[in-house]
Amino acid sequence: MKLSEKSADWIMPLILSIVMTFVISLVTSAISLGMSEFTLLRWISAWGISWIIAFPTLLLVLPFVRELTKRIIKWANAN
């Protein structure tokens, strides 16, 4: 099975949102709950909520971030 180059527009944000929310929800759950209250179920629940918000946000924001990045690089190279 081959995917088109265009599928990168949603695969990259998918993978990025999974990895980032996985790590951030683990850290914030451990800090806010403390190790005595921390459970796998609470962490996975927090991760799921985070991911549901993060993935569509990345899909919406990524085109603007790409454009801003291009402008910053162009501006930095002009100086």
Image (cartoon, helix red, strand yellow):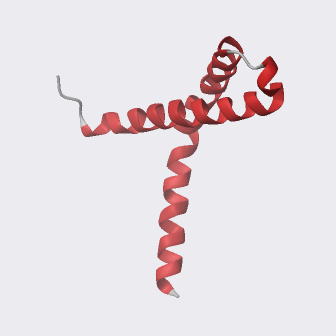
Residue lying at 79% horizontally and 33% vertically, measured from the top left: 31
Outermost residue, front direction? 36
Q: Nearer the viewer, residue 78 or 45?
A: 45
* In this picture, residue 40 sits left or right of residue 69: right
Residue appearing at x 44%, y 33% in the figure? 15
Determine the residue positioned at 82% across, 25% down. 33
Front-most of 34 and 20?
34
Query: Residue farthest to the top?
Result: 41
Q: Position of residue 17 (x, y in %)?
A: 53, 34
Q: Position of residue 73 (x, y in %)?
A: 48, 72
Q: Position of residue 19 (x, y in %)?
A: 51, 34
Closest to the observer: 12 or 78? 12
Name above or below for residue 43 compared with residue 74: above
**Image position of 4 (left or right of 63):** left
Q: Position of residue 11 (x, y in %)?
A: 39, 33
Q: Residue furthest bottom?
A: 79
Q: Quadrant of the N terminus?
A: top left
